Amino acid sequence: MKTVVARVTLSLAVLQALGLVPIIRRLRGSDSSVRFNARHDRLNAVGSLLIFGGLMLAPRSPT
């Protein structure tokens, strides 16, 4: 059961990391409102990655 949870969490973290690519591309744009929204999206994505990392490091019950 632990390996299933770890695999699901790892796959979600990989998908979230791949989602950073279009955000970084939008940060390089010339429109300031697009860059502003991309900054918020980047903050959201990095926060989610930190949560996934915490889930991977959290101790689990031995069951």
Image (cartoon, rainbow, N blue to C red):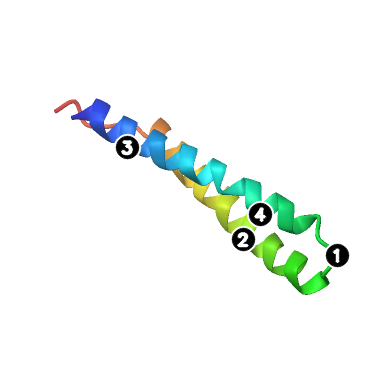
User: Which label sits on residue 41?
Assistant: 2
**Residue at mark 1 to residue at mark 2: CA–CA distance:** 17 Å
- Total number of numbered labels? 4
The picture quadrant where one finds residue 7 is top left
User: Which label sits on residue 8?
Assistant: 3
Report the residue at 50% width, 46% height from top: 16
Observer-nearest residue: 28 or 7?
28
Give the x, y percent position of residue 58.
Answer: 37, 34
Report the residue at 82% width, 70% height from top: 31
Assign a secondary structure to mark 3: helix
**Residue at mark 2 to residue at mark 3: CA–CA distance:** 22 Å
* Residue 4 falls left or right of residue 40: left
Circles 4 and 3: CB distance less than 8 Å?
no
Report the residue at 27% width, 35% height from top: 5
Q: Residue furthest bottom?
A: 33
Nearer the observer: mark 4 or 3; the answer is 4
Report the residue at 32% width, 37% height from top: 8
**Residue at mark 4 to residue at mark 2: CA–CA distance:** 7 Å
Specify which label sits upstream in the sequence, 4 or 2.
4
**Residue at mark 1 to residue at mark 4: CA–CA distance:** 14 Å
What's under tag 3, amino acid-wise? Val
Reading the image, the residue beneath label 1 is 30
Specify which label sits upstream in the sequence, 1 or 4.
4
Reading the image, the residue beneath label 4 is 23
Specify which label sits upstream in the sequence, 4 or 3.
3
Observer-nearest residue: 2 or 19?
19
Crowd class of label 1 (few under 14; some 14 to 19; many from 20; radius 10 Å): few
Assign a secondary structure to mark 1: loop
What's under tag 1, amino acid-wise? Ser
Q: Which quarter shows the C terminus?
A: top left
Give the x, y percent position of residue 21.
Answer: 64, 46
